Amino acid sequence: MRKSAQQTDTATRFTRPTETALRAAGWQPGRWDAARAEAWADELRAHMSSGGHVHLVFPAAIEAWAEFGGLRIAGQGPGRHIAPTPFTVDPLYGLHLARTLSDLGQALDTRLCPLGEEQGHAQGAGSALLAIDEEGRVYSLDHTGDWYLGADLDQALETLVTGTMPARLAT
């Protein structure tokens, strides 16, 4: 389901640094690629791990992919609390992590779907899987733990782009 006109008003939707980073990555208000989002949903649903784990796909994930899918977004500057890392909205980074997402979802009493990946500062160094739950909350999973990025995708984008310290999950 598309967001209302008020929610897509960028004058109130994103801070200037986040909107600037999004636009530099190719985003603009009204961007919507439902065909790509549905193709990703089909590929995720069709994948089964060797242990029999499957991905759960739901509207919050499809909407996020439709609006921001394929973008590589990078914050500028030192960040509020931590250095921002570039990230890509592409759920196929989590294709082989259905069990990981299922386990974390059970611990959080929700269902999770891959959203994308934070990239490390070194070329090609993946650092964290981004995931979204059925309510639209966004998480980051890396080798140091699991992190809560925001109550919705817009808040998570702000957290990532501005280098705001996310809350560590106690699971």
Image (cartoon, helix red, strand yellow):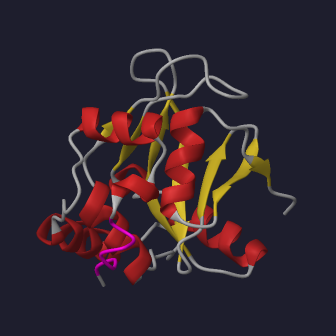
The answer to whether residue 22 is left or right of residue 37 is: right
Which secondary structure is most common in the magenta stretch? loop
For the record, the magenta segment spans 2-8
Q: Is residue 33 above or below residue 88?
A: below
Judged from this view, the residue extending furthest toward the right is 170
> Is 147 included in the stretch rendered in magenta?
no
Answer yes or no: is residue 57 visible. Answer: no
Judged left or right of residue 160, residue 124 is left
Residue drawn 28% across the image and 43% down it: 71
171 with respect to 150 (left or right): right
Residue 124 visible in image: yes
159 and 93: which is toward the camera: 159
Q: Vertically, is 164 above or below 136? A: above
Q: Quadrant of residue 19?
A: top left
Report the residue at 41% width, 30% height from top: 74
Q: Residue furthest left?
A: 35
Image quarter hosting the C terminus: bottom right
Give the left or right position of residue 3, taking residue 101 as reference.
Answer: left
Q: Residue at x 73, y 38 (%)?
A: 165
Q: Vertical placement of 75 versus 45: above or below?
A: above
158 or 47, which lies in front?
158
Q: How many marks?
A: 0
Which residue occupies 53% across, 17% down?
77
Where residue 65 sits in the image (x, y, percent)?
Answer: 31, 63
Residue 16 location (% of width, % of height): 44, 38
